[in-house]
């Protein structure tokens, strides 16, 4: 560990010409029925100590009679003097993986930073991670720690020194060390999210990046707020069995790509199923405690 110092496509472009020092980063936010949370997410981007040059909002055909798209356009106008904003509307809905790919392909900057519409970044997230990526050009993907926050507050906790560690293929196989809104990636790699996957598509991409011999690192510093439990609460993370099947499928994809052997698939699958059973127990205990209260 090393220590640092502390389908159919419609597009609208809201441009800004600003002399403030900026990170050469395109922020990609997939948006699905997020009219109530997108304001919080974008506020966390707008208060960065080093602003990104571009934010791309990808509206993934939300079935809400245009409510989400209206909110995105309103937010884009709100931040017209803060950063460039692209609003992209997709039709039909194809899932977050495809939405992120669309944003990725539309990005103009050399680094991609991923954010979900219901999460928020610490004000120093972009500056710390961007400077880390610039100072370590051999790193293609980096992520960092997250905090689960019970209220609706913006993240602004004090930060100490930032340690980091490289992430091996083996550790990536055993578990996913990154929540998606912690990740920054070099734009010019050829790999993308698997658009056929609705679950655990992020972990599969991290694995493919590592098995293509790109270097991956983790910053040991919490720089994003997550406003719900990591699994079993709402959204895609609530579909535990579907997530488990997709994780198991990821191992077979790696096997067919000749990244891992058959014995590895079996051992990883058994370990994954054990983790799934643990999650089931945690969710049931959590729900029982909620009912009791």
Image: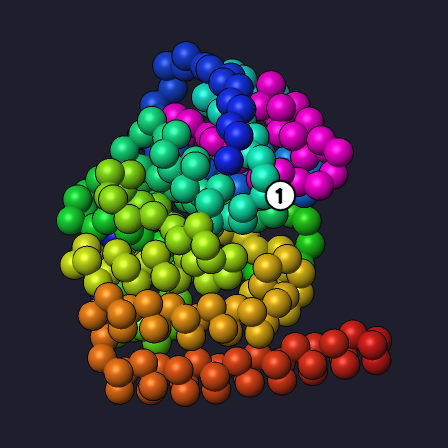
Q: Based on the picture, tell me whether residue 70 belongs to the magenta stretch.
A: yes
Residue 145 visible, this orientation? no
The residue shown at (53%, 42%) is 30
Tell me where the magenta segment starts and ends, as one range: 51-77
Residue at horizontal 61 percent and vertical 81 percent from the top: 280
Magenta span contains residue 244: no
Residue 186 visible in image: yes
- Across and down, in percent, residue 277 comes to 55, 85
Q: Position of residue 153 (x, y in %)?
A: 65, 47
Q: Secondary structure at mark 1?
A: loop
Which residue bears the numbered disc 1? 32
Residue 224: x and y, percent?
A: 49, 51
Task: Depth check: give the residue in front, 180 or 246.
Answer: 246
Q: What residue is at 64 percent from the left and 57 percent from the top?
A: 235
Q: Where, by quadrant of the figure, is residue 49 drawn?
A: top left
Q: Is residue 286 above or below residue 62?
A: below
Q: In the depicted view, which residue is nearer to us: 75 or 241? A: 241
Left or right: 219 with respect to 2?
right
Seen from the viewer's position, the closer of residues 268 and 82 is: 268
């Amino acid at each position: 560990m090393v220590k640092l110092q502390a389908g159919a496509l419609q597009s609208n472009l809201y441009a800004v010409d600003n002399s403030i020092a900026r990170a050469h980063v395109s922020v990609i936010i997939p948006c699905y029925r997020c009219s109530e949370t997108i304001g919080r997410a974008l506020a966390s981007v707008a208060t960065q100590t080093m602003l990104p040059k571009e934010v791309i909002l990808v509206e993934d055909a939300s079935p809400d009679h245009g409510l989400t798209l209206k909110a995105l356009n309103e937010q884009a106008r709100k931040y017209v003097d803060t950063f460039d904003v692209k609003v992209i509307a997709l039709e039909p809905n194809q899932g977050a993986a495809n939405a992120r790919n669309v944003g990725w392909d539309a990005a103009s900057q050399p680094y991609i930073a991923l954010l979900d519409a219901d999460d928020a970044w610490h004000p120093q997230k972009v500056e710390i991670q961007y400077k880390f990526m610039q100072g370590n050009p051999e790193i293609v993907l980096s992520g960092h720690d997250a905090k689960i926050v019970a209220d609706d507050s913006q993240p602004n906790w004090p930060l100490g020194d930032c340690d980091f560690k490289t992430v091996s293929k083996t550790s990536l196989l055993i578990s996913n060390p990154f929540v998606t809104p912690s990740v920054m990636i070099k734009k010019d790699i050829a790999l993308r999210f698997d658009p056929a996957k609705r679950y655990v598509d992020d972990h599969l991409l991290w694995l493919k990046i590592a098995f293509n011999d790109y270097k991956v690192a983790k910053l040991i510093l919490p720089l994003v707020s997550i406003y719900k439990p990591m699994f079993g609460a709402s959204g895609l993370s609530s579909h535990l069995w579907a997530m488990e099947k997709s994780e198991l499928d990821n191992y077979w994809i790696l096997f067919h790509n000749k990244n891992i052997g058959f014995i590895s698939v079996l051992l990883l699958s058994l370990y994954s199923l054990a983790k799934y059973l643990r999650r089931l127990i945690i969710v049931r205990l959590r729900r029982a405690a909620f009912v009791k209260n």
